Amino acid sequence: MQISSVLFRHERSSRTALVSPEQSAAFSYAELSRMSRELAADLQHKGLRPGDRVAILLPSSIEFVAAFFGASTAGAVVAPLDIYMKRADILGVLEIIKPTVLVTNRSLYRKIGLEHRPAIVCLLEFSGALSTAFLNSNGSSVRNEFEGEKGELPRTWKQPTVAPDEDALLILSSGSTGLPKAVRLSHQAVLRNIGMHLESLDIAEDIRGLQVLPMNYSYGLIACFLSILHSGGTAVLVPTPNPGPVVTAVSQYDVNLIMGTPAIFQYVIERAPAGSDFRRSPVRYVTLGGDRCRRYALNLVSKRLPSARPYITYGLTEAGPRVSTLPHRFVKKFPDSVGLPLRGVEISIIDERGRTRAPQETGEIVIRTPSLMNGYFGDPARTQKVIRNGLCHTGDFGYVDRRGFLYCLGRKDRQFKFGGRMVNPSFIEQCIASHPFVREVTVAKSENGQEEWLCARVKIREAPKEHLPEELRRFCRKRVPSHLVPGEFRFEHEDQYYHKGKVFSPAKEELPDQTTDKLAVARNGKRNSR
């Protein structure tokens, strides 16, 4: 089966599959299926073949959904791109994956200013109806393919022959090194992961899910969007996590499921419009994943959404992505855990020599999963480093307790030498984050040429800061070895939110206009020539 089956298994249903409040539009499964097949037929007519790569550069929208299912239905390998990447990075990614087709809109196409275009460029726009145009060799657009010429019969879609273990998706990530990597996920891997993920949530009602996570991201695309459709539910698109539109959409469309990162939940709840009554919210289920869930964020969600069942999840794109889930009934008892492995997933902890660690002992998290990636696109060396003997070496640092619950402390590559010992700051961060006044914390090594010390950057709730450093030191001394107690505490701006150690900002900048970008390059060139 292909990943497009998550849509077509419901193709005769009149149930609403997709709602886009921003575009004032909604589509049933039947309507979305028909629109996807029409676009697939046009792409096939233009020369797209099974196994060809299709890059999608579009925001979370009706156009994105049509492009995704249209390309997949034609048998293509779909590569969703982040529209907020810098222009140079987008061009670099296109050079690496060399797509046969680029699907975008006119605005984004102008802004990236492609000098060497893919063989096919498809421009999608929705304004009451979906229109499509293909660019010819000189960059001018050809007629609207959906309408066809007078008297012309509609294109005929041809069922592609695609094996379940062939690539379905290329999910791009910069990785911890900053070098781009494209994770190859097969049709069967994605479908298996969706099934395991939904089973772990055990939602016994029709899903009306908020799609606020970006769809170039495996959590947003697979664990959220495709899982909602696979269940026969309704996905409500909100492209950016601005509190006003999120709160309005939840109320207007009776949303009962929200999947997000801890930073998104914290931002929306704390910045929600005055008078927002979350206690009357229809939300019944929330999943917190994509980053470590600090105690503060979990308590905030539990307090402001008392009727919702919280689930803490862990995963990585290479695993399909979901690996484990902490069921809601265990959240209060084990709030620092990322849960139990999904059905069919095996988790072990190993040391630097590859030896299995005992329960409670820390090491690298290694997994065996039926939804394992096919590898990294064009990078067999990196693939062999991560996948060995059918096991995925995650690069994450953690442990499994005696009950089998997994604890992820952070990235293994965050380790540094301090006082002659290797230290992973994630362990210290987890300790400090459990203090009731602490909202966010990041620990790093500081030095001045004569000495070195650990510095904790802390974001706190309303509390007297003058006594807090010493209180946090006493708190740490009871929980971590003395050499891991930070020597310095710095208090960060209270309005900042963090995701994976970086400042989270939902108001992202758009791609620079091509002309502005060229003017900046020219100016820099003149300065450098002086």
Image (cartoon, helix red, strand yellow):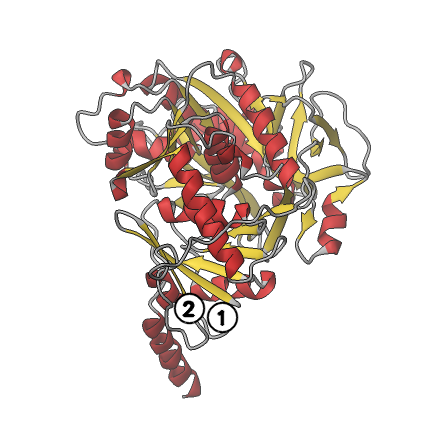
Where does residue 70 sit, x and y in percent of width and height? 48, 48
The residue nearer to you, when weighing 244 against 454, is 244
Which label was assigned to residue 117? 1
Are discs 2 and 1 less than 8 Å apart at CB?
A: yes
Element at label 2: loop
Q: Residue at x 49, y 21 (%)?
A: 311
Q: Amino acid at mark 2?
A: Leu
**C-alpha span from label 2 to label 1:** 10 Å
Q: Earlier in the sequence, mark 2 or mark 1?
A: 1
Which label was assigned to residue 135? 2
In this orientation, does residue 130 appear?
yes
The residue nearer to you, when weighing 495 against 339, is 339
Q: Amino acid at mark 1?
A: Arg
Q: Residue at x 79, y 29 (%)?
A: 356
Where does residue 58 sit, x and y in percent of width and height? 40, 53
Left or right: 145 as drawn, with respect to 128 = right
Task: Work out which quarter of the rendered image holds the C terminus and state it.
Answer: bottom left
Q: Residue at x 27, y 38 (%)?
A: 21
Above or below, 522 against 43 in this view is below
In this orientation, does residue 480 appear?
no
